Amino acid sequence: MLWHPWLVKVSLADLIQLERKVWDALVDGDAEADTELLAEEFIGIYPTGFANRSDHVAQLIGGPSVSAYTFSDSRKLDVSDRAFMLSYRAEFQRPSGEGESEVMYVSSLWIREDDNWVNVFSQDTPAEF
């Protein structure tokens, strides 16, 4: 493959850092940060159904929706020269402190728009034990 100056180079660590910004917004209850990280056309597919960017941000109206999280088993898929899929296992707790940790397998599609990274798609699949 020939190198072109418009090609974006991104590592697995770069994608994990981007994804952590979304999770940190959920921990901090930071709706503004969450909004900035999601593309206007964002679509999420969750156990509860489809969600757009406004739906995703709305979960923060009452404050943080996550109290702690960890990632493991992360993988990167190069979708195009400017789009990259991060898939991983997320274990997290809700702020209520009720119940045990929740575990989901997550895939997030990140694209480079001008000088910004935005998440355009995310799907969460509950882990079966």
Image: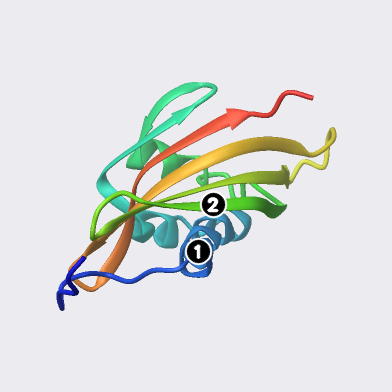
Q: Quadrant of residue 27?
A: bottom right
- Of helix, strand and loop, which one carries label 1? helix
Q: Mark 2 points at which residue?
A: 75
- Of helix, strand and loop, which one carries label 2? strand
Q: Residue at x 73, y 36 (%)?
A: 102
Q: Where is residue 15 in the image (x, y as percent from the top left)?
A: 46, 62
Q: Residue 63 carries which label?
A: none
Q: Residue at x 33, y 71 (%)?
A: 9
Relative to 20, say whether 55 is above or below. above
Relative to 105, say whether 95 is above or below. below
Relative to 55, say whether 30 is above or below. below
| Residue placed most toward the observer, 91 or 32 | 91
**Residue 39 shown left or right of residue 64 in the figure:** left
Q: Which residue is drawn at 15% across and 74% down?
A: 4
Quadrant into which the N terminus falls:
bottom left
Relative to 105, say whether 38 is above or below. below
Q: Name the residue under label 1.
A: 12
- Mark 2 or mark 1, which has the lower sequence index? 1
Badge count: 2
Q: Where is residue 71 in the image (x, y as percent from the top left)?
A: 66, 53
The residue most toward the front is 1
The amino acid at mark 2 is Arg
Q: Position of residue 63 (x, y in %)?
A: 59, 50
Query: For mark 2, does the 10 Å Cα neighbourhood hold few (<14), some (14 to 19), or many (20 or more) residues?
Result: some
**Residue 80 shown left or right of residue 61 in the figure:** left
